[in-house]
């Protein structure tokens, strides 16, 4: 019908035909290529008629589908309210009717042929191949080798079917012959009819078959009962499986909820732990700061009172006798101690300048005023005005007197300022005495055991500035100004000044140091009392 094309590849590519079994390119026989419509009709008339439409119900058709189409068949059956197929055949066939074959219609006079259409012979060959594939279970076209192999297979199948047909014919002849023999020998019925089991075999054989049939029926009944029991067990197992599946879903949901809750609690625990560590750190810092603050002395930080040694020297504007005495003490190496407040020396003239002394007295005035405010005391006759290096003390109304707590370095203005400065120191010393008296009344610890204060003297040292009488020995009016005595002659005054000039500055320095000692005692005792109150009021840690 067709031959293999091995040497003419161009012709096979032009025809586009391949063998449907070995998939090798084919070169059609010239008789097929030049097929006429008459030959085509002759060949098609010899083919078997197409199969009639199937009379099977839709469910049976679905059951006849191959296993690969079961899924689509079940979907289609469910959509059309049919019972889905349980099993299908191994394969299915699609039969094409004659309506799928192209028919040649006469071309009209006005219709011109299409140049792209293939020749009539090639079109008829393709139609013939399609028709042969649809009417027979063999796909066409085939090459010569495949056709030979197919013929051999069909020949073997024909021989097997012939032998099977002969066996059926021999079996049928034996049954008919046995029926005739039974009818002639047994004569069981008048009308000559045979019984149900009188077709073939002896009575023993039929009795054995009947017993076998009953046994099989009983076995079938038992198997059916077992099958029902198994189906009930399967149903119970399905119910249990469904219950287990629901329990598994519930457990999965509970587990997911637990994991979410655990994650949230873990995050919250982490935040709380971090907050706790932060709070502990803040607590430790606060305790450290509290210990530091408890050990701190605010009054000591504000007014740091101490003392430093001072080596006397001959520098600075003292009298000649004082200079000589200072020089002699310097040569012998003797020294005195000068009180300090915040590093400023209070006393030590003439070694210490007036600028430093004025600043130190300003701090002393501020300290006395703050202590009075701290203990809640108002001075009776004075008002302290702390103004740094230019502090002063004023009389309370109706008094209008004002006393300076500073001295100018200018010698021309010191004559009047010295008296105002000395009176200011006496007034400041009186304020300190008032504080001590008030402390005794209120049972302050610093009011007892301090140095004795009487008028202008503290610890038997005068707080007045020395050296004014010796500076102006020839003025008779010094007694009027308060710098001398009217009963003492100028010569006696000069002799006494010469005798005391070496100790006047030292005595004044010791008086200043005694004032600072009183203030330091007040500050220390008040700081300890404040610290005790803070510790007593603090919560127990």
Image (cartoon, grey):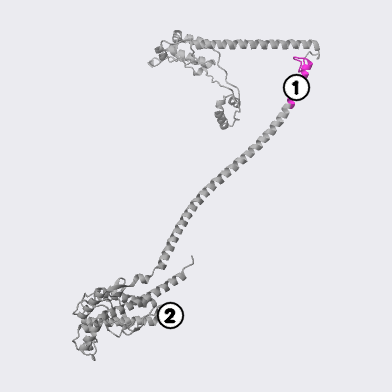
Q: Is residue 286 left or right of residue 493?
A: right
Residue at 56 percent across and 11 percent down: it is 154
What is the x, y in percent for residue 506? 28, 79
Q: Read off the residue under disc 1.
A: 212
Q: Is residue 443 left or right of residue 133?
A: left
| Residue 369 shows up from this direction | no
The correct choice, above or below, for 258 with respect to 54 in the image is: below
Instruction: Please provide the residue range marked out in magenta.
Output: 194-218
What is the x, y in percent for residue 392? 28, 79
Q: Is residue 135 magenta?
A: no
Q: In which quarter of the view is residue 484 placed? A: bottom left
Residue 406's disc is none
Q: Is residue 248 left or right of residue 146?
A: right
The answer for how far apart the CA atoms under marks 2 and 1 are is 133 Å
Q: Read off the residue under disc 2.
A: 443
Between 373 and 320, the residue placed more toward the observer is 320
Q: Residue furthest top?
A: 31
């Amino acid at each position: 019908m067709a031959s293999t094309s091995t040497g003419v590849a161009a012709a096979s590519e032009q025809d586009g035909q391949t063998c449907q079994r070995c998939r090798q390119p084919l070169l059609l026989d010239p008789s097929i290529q030049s097929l006429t419509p008459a030959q085509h009709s002759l060949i098609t008339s010899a083919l078997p008629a197409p199969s009639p439409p199937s009379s099977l119900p839709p469910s049976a058709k679905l059951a006849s589908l191959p296993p690969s189409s079961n899924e689509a068949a079940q979907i289609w059956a469910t959509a059309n309210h049919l019972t889905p197929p349980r099993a299908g055949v191994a394969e299915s066939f699609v039969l094409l009717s004659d309506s799928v074959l192209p028919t040649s219609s006469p071309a009209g006079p006005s219709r011109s042929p299409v140049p792209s259409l293939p020749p009539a012979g090639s079109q008829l060959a393709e139609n013939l191949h399609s028709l042969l594939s649809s009417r027979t279970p063999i796909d066409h076209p085939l090459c010569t080798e495949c056709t030979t192999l197919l013929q051999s297979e069909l020949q073997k199948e024909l021989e097997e079917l012939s032998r099977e047909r002969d066996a059926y014919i021999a079996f049928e002849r034996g049954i008919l012959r046995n029926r005739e023999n039974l009818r002639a020998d047994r004569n069981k019925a008048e009308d000559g009819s045979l019984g149900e089991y009188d077709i073939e075999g002896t009575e023993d054989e039929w009795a054995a078959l009947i017993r076998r049939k009953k046994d099989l029926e009983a076995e079938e009944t038992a198997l059916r009962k077992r099958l029902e029991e198994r189906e009930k067990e399967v149903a119970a197992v399905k119910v249990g499986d469904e219950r287990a599946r629901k329990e598994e879903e519930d457990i999965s949901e509970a587990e997911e909820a637990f994991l979410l809750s655990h994650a949230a609690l873990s995050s919250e625990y982490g935040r709380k732990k971090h907050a706790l560590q932060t709070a502990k750190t803040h607590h430790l810092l606060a305790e450290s700061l509290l210990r530091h603050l408890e050990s701190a002395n605010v009054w000591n930080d504000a007014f740091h009172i101490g003392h430093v040694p001072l080596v006397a020297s001959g520098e600075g504007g003292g009298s000649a006798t004082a200079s000589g005495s200072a020089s002699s003490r310097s040569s012998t190496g003797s020294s005195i101690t000068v009180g300090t407040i915040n590093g400023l020396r209070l006393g030590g003239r003439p070694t210490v300048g007036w600028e430093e002394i004025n600043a130190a007295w300003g701090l002393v005035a501020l300290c006395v005023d703050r202590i009075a405010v701290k203990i809640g005391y108002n001075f009776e006759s004075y008002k302290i005005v702390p103004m740094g290096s230019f502090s002063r003390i004023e009389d309370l109304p109706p008094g209008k007197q004002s006393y300076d707590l500073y001295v100018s370095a200018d010698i021309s203005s010191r004559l009047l300022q010295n008296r105002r400065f000395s009176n200011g120191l006496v007034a400041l010393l009186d304020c300190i005495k008032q504080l001590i008296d008030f402390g005794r009344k209120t049972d302050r610890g610093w009011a007892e055991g301090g140095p004795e204060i009487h008028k202008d003297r503290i610890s038997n040292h005068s707080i007045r500035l020395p050296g004014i009488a010796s500076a102006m020995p020839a003025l008779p009016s010094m007694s009027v100004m308060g710098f001398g005595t009217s009963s003492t002659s100028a010569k006696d005054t000069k002799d006494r000044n010469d005798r005391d000039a070496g100790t006047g500055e030292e005595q004044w320095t010791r008086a200043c140091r005694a004032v600072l000692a009183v203030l330091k005692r007040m500050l220390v005792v008040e700081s300890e009392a404040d610290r005790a109150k803070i510790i007593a009021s603090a919560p127990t840690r």
